[in-house]
Amino acid sequence: MRLRFMMRDVVIAAALLLAAPAGVARAEPNLGNWSVGSNDGQITASLHASNKLITGGGALGYSPVLTLACRPDGEPRWSEWLQLNDAVSASRKITISVIVDGGKTDESWSVGPRGRTLVRDGDDGIKRLVSASRLTLSWRFGLLSGRGEADFELAGLSDALGQLAASCNTDPP
């Protein structure tokens, strides 16, 4: 008798599977290596650099993190920032060389708390990335400290920006 009930459950489960619409798949966004979340009231998409920087002591390496963010309410609506483990010696502004798919330009970014975050507000910086596949950011840590460089493979950016814009009830840049 117990076997009969078990068999009946198996038959019902099989029937339900067969009754499910065939070929219907949920289209999940392809975010690549981007991770979407929130931070201080902003919706964020973050990506680790494909290269490593060596810390001041030289013993450990880390990958800088590029974060794109939108604010559901308030200004600036869009911003981007670069998170570092080692501080830059600049206090307010820093010049960053930006290479997008081979095209180079210099931009002024703000230096965040303790010099470990470099920030650029506005959607124009994000717009330059929409059709790009690769981004390289390069900056000076200090007068005698040398340069830092972070390389990013931007696969999945379009879907990540779509999620950010939807969460912020706005259009993507």
Image: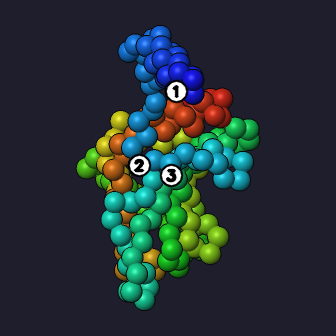
* Mark 3 element type: strand
Q: CA distance from mark 1 to mark 2?
A: 48 Å
**Comparing labels 1 and 3, the label whose residue is closer to the camera:** 1
**Comparing labels 1 and 2, the label whose residue is closer to the camera:** 1
The residue drawn where x is 33% and y is 65% is 51
Above or below, 64 relative to 54? above
Residue 11 position, x and y percent, is: 48, 17
Which picture quadrant has residue 29? top left
Q: Is disc 1 in contact with disc 3, using a CB cutoff of under 8 Å?
A: no
- Give the side of residue 91 with respect to residue 97, left or right: right
In this figure, which colouring scheme has been used for the structure? rainbow
Q: Mark 3: which amino acid?
A: Ser
Q: Mark 1: which amino acid?
A: Leu
**Comparing labels 2 and 3, the label whose residue is closer to the camera:** 2
Give the residue number, with chain letter if any, for mark 3: 46
Q: CA distance from mark 2 to mark 3?
A: 8 Å
N-terminal-most mark, 1 or 3: 1
Residue 81 position, x and y percent, is: 54, 57
For mark 3, does the 10 Å Cα neighbourhood hold few (<14), some (14 to 19), or many (20 or more) residues? many
| Residue 145 visible to an observer of this rendering | no
The residue drawn where x is 50% and y is 52% is 46
The residue drawn where x is 51% and y is 32% is 162
Give the residue number, with chain letter if any, for mark 1: 3
Residue 9 position, x and y percent, is: 54, 22
Residue 157 position, x and y percent, is: 42, 40
Give the residue number, with chain letter if any, for mark 2: 33
